[in-house]
Amino acid sequence: MISKSRLIYHIEGIVQGVGFRPFVYTIALRYALKGFVLNNSKGVIIEVEGFKESLDAFEEALFKELPPLARIDFWHKDTLDSKNDTIFEIHHSEESDVKSSLVLPDMSICQECLAELQDPTNRRYHYFFTNCTHCGPRYSIIQTVPYDRPYTSMHPFTMCQACQDEYTNPLNRRYHAQPISCPNCGPTLFLRAMSGELLASNEEAICKLAGLINAGHIVAMKGMGGFHLMCDATNDTTVAKLRERKHRPSKPFAVMFKTLDAIHEVCDLSVQEEEGIGSLLRPIVLVKRHKKASKLSSLIAPHIDRLGVFLPYTPLHVMLFEYLSNPIVATSANRSGEPIISEAKVLEQKLGDVVEYYLDYNREIVNSSDDSVLQYLGDKTLIMRSSRGLAPQSFRMTSTDERKILAVGAHQKNAIAIYLNHQMIVSPYIGDLDNIASHGLFEKMIESFARFYNFTPELIVGDMHPNYVSTQWAKKQSIPFLQVQHHYAHILSTMCEHQLNEPVLGIAWDGTGYGDDGTIWGGEFLLCDQNGYERVAYFEPFLLLGGDASIKEIKRILASLLWDVLGDEADIHLLNYFDSTSLKLLKQIYTKKINAPLCSSVGRLFDAVAVLCGMEENVTYDGESGLLIEALYDPVITEYYDVKIDDKIIDYKSMFSQMLHDKDPHVIASKFINTLVKILLTLKSRYDYPVVLGGGVFQNRTLMEKILQNVTQNLYFPLQLAVNDGGICVGQVYKALSK
Ligand SMILES: [Zn+2]
Ligand SMILES: [Zn+2]
């Protein structure tokens, strides 16, 4: 006689709030198995009973047919005695049990919801808030855990009977989809003038908003994680007006297109880029523009050959494009450097002089987020901003450390991370902590994570910089505080992602970070493991004349470097960039070394090279110099500058006098990138260790492509985490987990 057996599965990972239990229910019914599935504090427990072949088929389906957003990090199974159940059920979980389930990011609209949105016979035809278990908002609407409708900003909206029926049917795609709604029971859209005057609502509001954009107005629209500023991306006058009102002379704007085909008209896309742009993540992807003219305004991304492109990602965006004539600028609505605005009254206060009309809706954005930004290196991603769709991001650690740890990150592009129950959880991008609004978001983020995960840290980890807001905040808490050197944390972050704990050669190139000798670092070769590091080589420091003033007025960096190489002979060249009085004053700073910290940053060298390549104006956004140099790079030029590397010090400064002879910006830019690669390869050849990269300089796609051409093995860089300072919090936690 063939007997039945019973199995119990313990499953951890992203298995709650993603339709995992109904999925298990469906496959259990398919193979006529009995038992139950339930959520517990760690994930999901399944008990199934039936014949062996059915159990085998069930297990195969369990791993192969996962719902789109689910992810299994850990599982374990055991055999139990038969209980002779007669049905398979979804058991309800106790509220207290689910306190540590993961808070998931917001997701873009899925194919099934999109089809319903466009189907005139569907009851959600043209319904701008349609969503299901596989898509839609999560992070932006959650107030506290468990992730259940009463604890979200959907709470004020009572489900109609039809929605209720879908919500409670385990075989329906909207079973327990917390933001479920329909035209009869969901939130309302409002189009308003900046005076607050109501102009239209719901679909009429979308239609009128599109009309205003088509007519050349600057508008704002409340999306998933906050308001976007929008305007017609083909209208020079409007884009110029937006730049002027925002005091944003050249920082590129991201452009949202209706379809991939529309993007093809402007850019060449690789297969990976196409897939990435169209993925459920719907990030902004930085791609190369065609050389030929396009209908896009030339003011969208001046002087560079890249463009940030993305597709509509909520049903509301899809609906808007039904009525738009052209691609649109869609950029986070904020005051320069501040977090994205998510409330209409803040929009009115802060951008009243920029925006002319706005589309709002009466569902609160509890947690704001920006669009994620990434680029592709072949089939690999380089993440520049980890936010909507990607964050909060979680991954399971192998550490046995039971402590609860909070990492507060660095200062620029701040993000925080927490560690608990062997999980690393990384927050969305917070921003540069340079203003009150960003400080507020930083503190709010820490509070939210404490609430989501019932989390009180036993240890805080942060940067060594005494003046960082994050450092100062950490010092005020009565909790042990561990400080980790900035560039070491960059390398640790990449090591953590790739689960490396053996010694590595870490190469950390970025803008600026506080060195353990009190000078500014940023061109570092660190021999390190999780326990510590040795600074085995670095770019010869130069004086950063006027400190931060050099970071804005980048020709000061060139002056400092040229004086180092040429002495007084440099003056004649520098008079091309300074009037004689300013040059005299600057030279005093140089000779007296007052307010002129030493700096070894590679990011700052890009600035000096950009000046020689013709970028005479001040840097107005982070990464501007790098993008300009990339635009000038010519792959046909394979030469590089001579650089001496003694034991520890990379003596590159003569490169700048050689550049004066080269004159041609294409030659200078190309030889400069080639030289950096040459330096990296020379140092690499001295050590027989895996090479680990970290730091904002590696956002430079041209540099990365050259490195990848030359180093084909044992090279690690971040693929899931931001390569810039946004990833530092993870490195900080990884240091705390050493021992
Ligand atoms: Zn959906
Ligand atoms: Zn309804």
Image (cartoon, rainbow, N blue to C red):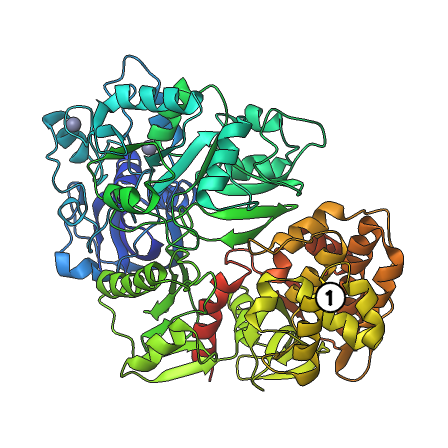
In terms of depth relative to the viewer, which is nearer, 411 or 698?
Answer: 411
> Identity of the amino acid at label 1?
Ser
Disc 1 is placed on an element classified as helix
Q: Where is mark 1, residue-wise?
A: 580
Q: Residue at x 30, y 80 (%)?
A: 476
**Residue 474 appears in the figure:** yes
Q: Within 10 angstroms of label 1, few (less than 14), some, or many (20 or more) residues?
A: some
**Residue 651 appears in the figure:** no
* Image-quadrant location for residue 57: top left
* Image-quadrant location for residue 76: bottom left
In terms of depth relative to the viewer, which is nearer, 240 or 622?
Answer: 240
| Horizontal and vertical percent position of residue 368 | 32, 49
The relative height of residue 109 versus residue 654 in the rendered view (above or below) is: above
Residue lying furthest bottom: 517
| Horizontal and vertical percent position of residue 138 | 29, 45
| Horizontal and vertical percent position of residue 308 | 55, 40
* Image-quadrant location for residue 198: top left
How many discs mark residues in the rendered view? 1
* Mark 1 residue CB less than 8 A from any atom of ligand 1: no
- Tell whether 178 sits left or right of 356: left
- Tell whether 497 sits left or right of 608: left
Residue lying furthest front: 581
Q: Residue at x 39, y 72 (%)?
A: 469
Q: Residue at x 22, y 63 (%)?
A: 451
Looking at the image, in which quadrant does ligand 1 appear? top left
Image quadrant holding the N terminus, namely top left
| Horizontal and vertical percent position of residue 675 | 80, 63
In terms of depth relative to the viewer, which is nearer, 171 or 694?
Answer: 694
